[in-house]
Amino acid sequence: MTRTSTPPQQATESGLRPDCLPFSDVFAQSIATIAPTVGPALTIALVHESAGAGTWLTYVIATAAMLLVAASINVFASRSASPGALSDVVAQGLGPRAGVVAAWALCLAYLFTAMAVACGFANFMDVLLAPVTGPLPVFWELACVGIACVCACRDVRLSTGLMLALEIGSLTAIVALAVIVVLTRGTLVDPAQLELRDVTPGGVMFGLVLATLSFVGFESATTLGHEARDPLRTIPRAVTTSTLFSGVFYVIMSYVEVLGFSFLPRAMHASPAPLDELAAAAGVGILGAAISVGAAVSMFACTLACINAVSRIIYAMARQAIVHESYGRTHDRAATPHVAAMVASVVIALATTAVSLTGVTPLDGFATFGSLGTYGFLIVYVLVSVAAPRYLARRGELKAWNVLCSALAVAMMAMPFAATVGLPLPGSPFPVPAYPYDVLPYAFVLLLAAASAWSLARPRGW
């Protein structure tokens, strides 16, 4: 069966600028949303709090799970392209109502992830400038979201090119620090990590929630379906390549960071800037400061990438009458979904500001919003993995490999859910998490159910 890209006239009618993004820009969208700099700078330390010496193993499992999900996503991405991204493919495999649920899950996931990284941006700006300005989390969050909104409303190639350039600079500095840490320690061998000392299944599974957060957004290249050149080739390549690149990077960096902190007095998860401490201990404090700048910049790039992605999802939802049609307008000159981008930015700004004003630290805001975002992505990944074999079966293309990939992906996505909900039984490998993480899954499901029910109850074409 011949696979062809979206017809040019269809792309033009979408209101978005067609055929304008080469592979590098599509890849940049996924990489910037993943924000691999954020992993070593912050997320790995949070995973270590529960997974301990098994942090590297947690990332191995997360990488395998994401590659399985990527295989299911590419079942659709190699056959059709649209800005509706994964919600469209769920609708093709499981029906329109499931597509509405997926659309809202993905929309909420990107919104919460943007809130998380805006908090992360504020955290690193305070690390850098608080000695001079004092802590200003609300100011930094609003600045991050506001500038990202302006960029998202302008030409899409400006956004993607800027994101890739910012991420490359940050990753280069982190790799340099990793080499210095290993040379300073004089060995790559860490018996505690290799023997998985004091590692528990529950700790690894709970760590998977935040480890999954390190990858979420790898599928965001699919939101550029009308704007990518040869989307049926470039988008699947971007999805797989960004996942594999980030996974290898996370596994190596998690091992090196845990090795480096094994010689330091403070636990890694207690540090607001782990790479700064490693750099100072290795005698290259100036590199640590540069990495903190890079981490802040990466957080900004991720905020921009999330706004890019969620604006296109809201735009597609408007064209499908899931939300009001006014959200489906595009800018006359820039051909970007500027209305959706501005609405999303206002929601992100209000949420982060409200949380900061209640006294929640940016680091806690990052972890809380990040967990909420992860639940949305996990739900969508499960729906896509279930939809893929049904979609292929209807086309007469189903193979045993597709069923196996889907089953393994669903099983691996279920493990973080089990860990976050917990089993209140004596000796359970999945104890109930501490507050607020014990209520976050239920809060997300209630929010998703309310939004989906509201859209399904609205008359079509309202």
Image: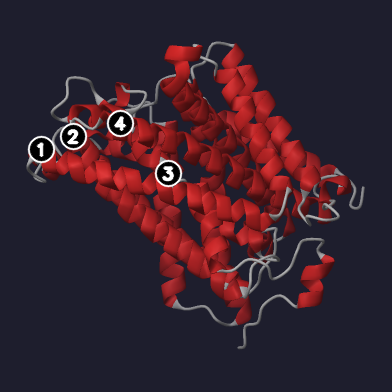
| Three-letter code for the amino acid on which mark 3 is drawn | Ser
For the residues labelled 2 and 1, say whether their Cβ atoms are less than 8 Å apart. yes
Dot label at residue 86 = none
Q: Secondary structure at mark 3?
A: loop
Q: Which residue is mark 1?
A: 185
Residue beneath the point at 11% across and 46% down: 188
Q: Earlier in the sequence, mark 2 or mark 1?
A: 1
Give left or right: position of 425 versus 28. left
In the figure, 121 relative to 176: above or below? above
Where does label 4 land, which residue?
A: 286
How packed is label 3: few (under 14 Cα within 10 Å), some, or many (20 or more)?
A: many
Q: Residue at x 86, y 55 (%)?
A: 332
Q: How is the image coloured?
A: secondary structure
Would residue 354 appear left or right of 55 to someone viewing this image? right
How many neighbours does mark 4 have within 10 angstroms: few (below 14), some (14-19), or many (20 or more)? few
Q: Is residue 353 left or right of residue 219?
A: right
Q: Earlier in the sequence, mark 4 or mark 2?
A: 2
Tell me the distance, in whole angstroms, between the alpha carbons under discs 2 and 3. 21 Å
Q: Position of residue 377 (x, y in %)?
A: 54, 46
State which tag comes first along the sequence, 1 or 4: 1
Q: Cα distance, mark 4 to mark 3?
A: 26 Å
Report x, y in % for residue 390.
Answer: 58, 69
Amino acid type, callout 4: Ile
Q: Earlier in the sequence, mark 4 or mark 3?
A: 3
Residue furthest out toward the right: 462
Q: CA distance from mark 2 to mark 1?
A: 7 Å
As drawn, the label of residue 214 is 3
